[in-house]
Image (cartoon, rainbow, N blue to C red):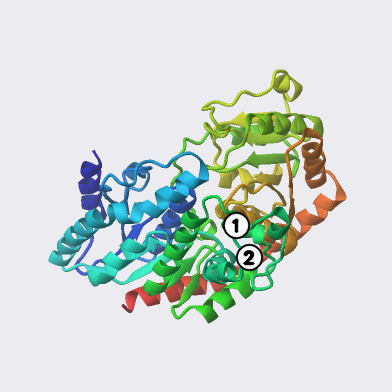
């Protein structure tokens, strides 16, 4: 079926095209937080006249029916990159193994695609590979295809990648105790050690390999594309341009510039939008912890009763697998009765639409970068509960730099949840955060206007691609 999708989509992509059609090739990492920005970038480039070809793994394969104007080329692995193991360590190991496992097949598939396009006198402009796939950058370079990398996290996060060997040399990581984890990093303000992608001894070597591979991919490419914008990370972008010898393109927020077709790997329940219509402005708390983060059964119970006690209306995403060891979540007895009429639970939500809804006044988030930027662009304050990876660093920026939210730290306890929810949604402190969030939203809007920094960056990216 995947091969049939490849051929059918390929024929559709060329319908009506003339000679010398210019193609961009994309290869995302097959996880939601990576697939989404890659497809948004595809939308931006397609709108500039490029034909789009998407190489993808069989694991978490995208649905070509959602993107009928793109061509899809499946790339099998060699059997060494099995599905991810338990938890974030399993995901990290899977991502590290993925590039090597798909390298030989990608070389064969890319060679065949190049032969086909060149036989039609079409031009291949470049490959854009996720920065966690250095093998794909190497294959493209070897076959004469200019390669760029997309980093799906923040500029600050990638600065941490670049500095990570220094932090290892200085003994900052891995930490030996919790006090060391709280130490501020003078080389990377406002990060503390615990805000780095990884800082504990458990799983440290594999995480260090993940970061080193991303840095190697970026440095081997002809340009770095970031889903961020100058008003949000101007200082951090300037630092990357100083430290890298390749151009850096800050083309975000991509979800605003490219409201693309659905790239969700989970089925969205759009009925929640109609439910929001009945609520006053800024009254509802949206709660979602992303596509990978998990919580214990105890944390689920404490979160539930904290939400109930807060008295605040809420929309809560309870995706299958959110609770460790359980495919379906078991809410505590009496919770649904206690929140009937002001609480709605769904498996998955159309998040961008929800965040833009006037009834939503705050976002309890895991602080994945996509969720963080979507919240910023919606002008919403955040209650931060980061879980792993770059989420801690993103939360640090939310609380300590942009001051549009705060972190709910420590063990979850219903009284603390209640107080945090009310602080964000009801109290004056939350109103001040909301006002700053609205200011940041306006700054983001300036970046995506015709002469804004992000639009100019896109034009520079297109010029860079077409000049190769």
Rendering quarter of residue 315: top right
Neighbourhood count class around disc 2 (C-alpha, 10 Å): few under 14, some 14–19, many 20 upward? some
Residue at the image point whose x is 80% and y is 37% from the top: 418
Compared to residue 181, the image places residue 166 above or below, namely: below
Which residue has dot 1 on it? 199
User: What quarter of the picture does the C terminus occupy?
Assistant: bottom left
Compare marks 2 and 1 and give the one earlier in the sequence.
Answer: 2
**Residue topped by disc 2:** 172
The reply to whether residue 160 is in sight is yes
Circle 1 residues within 10 Å: few <14, some 14–19, many ≥20: many
Question: Please, is residue 7 above or below residue 113 in the view?
Answer: above
Asked if residue 209 lies left or right of residue 437, the reply is left
Which mark, residue 102? none
Circle 1: element type: loop
Q: Are marks 2 and 1 in contact (CB under 8 Å)?
A: yes
Query: In the drawing, does residue 444 fall left or right of residue 165?
Result: right
- Residue at (56, 38) in percent of width and height: 349
Residue plotted at (52% across, 55% down)? 204
| SS of the residue under disc 2 | loop
Q: Is residue 136 left or right of residue 155?
A: left
Q: Quadrant of the N terminus?
A: top left
Judge by depth and name the residue closer to the eye, 184 or 283. 184
| Residue furthest right in the image | 428
Q: Position of residue 147 (x, y in %)?
A: 34, 69
- In the foreground, 32 or 190: 190
* Residue 194: image location, x then y, percent: 65, 57
Q: Nearer the viewer, residue 7 or 328?
A: 328
């Amino acid at each position: 079926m995947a091969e049939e999708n490849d051929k059918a989509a390929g024929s559709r992509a060329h319908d009506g095209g003339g000679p010398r059609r210019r193609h961009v090739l994309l290869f995302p990492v097959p996880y939601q937080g990576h697939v989404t920005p890659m497809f948004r970038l595809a939308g931006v480039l397609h709108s500039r006249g490029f034909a789009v070809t998407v190489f993808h793994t069989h694991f978490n394969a995208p649905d070509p029916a959602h993107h009928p104007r793109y061509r899809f080329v499946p790339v099998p692995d060699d059997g060494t990159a099995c599905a991810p193991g338990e938890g974030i360590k399993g995901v990290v190991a899977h991502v590290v193994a993925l590039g090597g496992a798909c390298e030989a097949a990608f070389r064969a598939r890319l060679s065949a695609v190049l032969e086909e396009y060149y036989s039609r006198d079409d031009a291949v402009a470049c490959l854009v590979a996720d920065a966690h796939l250095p093998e794909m950058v190497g294959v493209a370079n070897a076959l004469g295809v200019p390669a760029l990398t997309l980093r799906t996290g923040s500029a600050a996060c990638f600065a941490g990648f670049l500095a990570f060997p220094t932090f290892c040399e200085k003994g900052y990581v891995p930490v030996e105790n919790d006090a060391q984890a709280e130490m501020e990093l003078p080389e990377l303000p406002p990060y503390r050690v615990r805000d780095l992608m990884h800082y504990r001894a458990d799983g440290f070597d594999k995480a260090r390999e993940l970061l080193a591979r991303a840095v190697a991919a970026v440095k081997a490419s002809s340009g770095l594309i970031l889903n961020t914008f100058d008003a949000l990370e101007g200082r951090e972008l300037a630092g990357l341009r100083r430290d890298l010898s390749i151009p850096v393109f800050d083309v975000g927020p991509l979800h605003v510039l490219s409201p693309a077709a659905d790239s969700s790997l989970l089925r969205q329940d759009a009925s929640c939008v109609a439910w929001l219509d009945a609520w006053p402005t800024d009254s509802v708390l949206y709660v979602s912890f992303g596509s990978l983060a998990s919580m214990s059964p105890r944390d689920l119970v404490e979160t539930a009763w904290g939400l109930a006690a807060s008295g605040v209306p809420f929309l809560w995403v309870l995706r299958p697998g959110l609770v460790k060891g359980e495919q379906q979540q078991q809410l505590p007895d009496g919770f649904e009765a206690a929140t009937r009429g002001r609480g709605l639970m769904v498996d998955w939500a159309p998040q961008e639409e929800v965040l833009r809804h006037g009834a939503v006044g705050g976002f309890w988030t895991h602080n994945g970068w996509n969720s963080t930027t979507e919240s910023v662009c919606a002008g919403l304050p955040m209650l931060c509960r980061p879980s792993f990876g770059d989420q801690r660093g993103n939360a640090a920026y939310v609380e300590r730099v942009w001051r549009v939210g705060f972190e709910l730290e420590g063990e979850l306890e219903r009284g603390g949840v209640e107080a945090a929810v009310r602080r964000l949604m009801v109290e004056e402190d939350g109103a001040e955060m909301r006002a700053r969030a609205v200011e940041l939203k306006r700054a983001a809007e300036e970046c995506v206007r015709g002469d804004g920094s992000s639009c100019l960056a896109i034009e520079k990216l297109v010029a860079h691609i077409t000049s190769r």
